[in-house]
Image (spheres, rainbow, N blue to C red):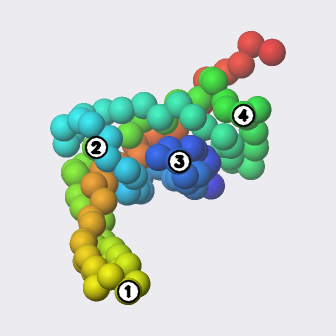
Amino acid sequence: MNYAIIEASGRQLWIEEGRFYDLNYIPGEPGDLIKLNKILLVNNNNNIRIGYPCLKSITIKAKILRHIKGKKIAVFKIKPKKNNKSKQGHRQKLTRLLIQEILIQKDNK
């Protein structure tokens, strides 16, 4: 089983080839290819490599599938004794990425 743990959008994600993930908005058009290069850990057929803090010889190719909006949340603010209330909604912009491949290059060690 091949997988990697990356840092993207301020979160650490366990990713695998052929699956899609929702990250914070990444500028680009659907169909664009991007490279993710903050890889913290890679498991390649039980050969585990850990970065300190990142692995430089590994890149992940991903394709932007589409831009979506996250689940709606309600923000409700109230000021006591002032009869002041406000309700507001928010939906986070997200980008859906398809992980195409995890490229592992040989180190010269």
Q: Is residue 73 above or below residue 42?
A: below
Query: Disc 1 or 4, which lies upstream in sequence?
Result: 4
Question: In the rendered image, which residue does mark 2 sit on?
Answer: 64
Question: In the rendered image, which residue does mark 3 sit on?
Answer: 10
106 left or right of 20 in image: right
Q: Is residue 69 above or below residue 62?
A: below
How much space separates mark 1 and mark 4, taking CA atoms? 50 Å
Question: In the rendered image, which residue does mark 4 sit on?
Answer: 53
**Can residue 103 be seen in this snapshot?**
no
Query: In terms of secondary structure, where does tag 4 sit?
Result: strand
98 left or right of 56 in image: left
The residue type indicated by label 1 comes to: Lys
| Label 2 Cα neighbours within 10 Å, binned few <14 / some 14-19 / many ≥20 | many
Q: Nearer the viewer, mark 3 or mark 4?
A: 3
The reply to whether dot 3 and dot 2 touch (C-beta < 8 Å) is: no
Query: In terms of secondary structure, where does tag 2 sit?
Result: strand
Write down the quadrant of residue 68 in the picture: bottom left
Task: Return the mark for residue 81.
Answer: 1
- The picture places residue 90, in percent across and down from the top left corner, at 27, 66
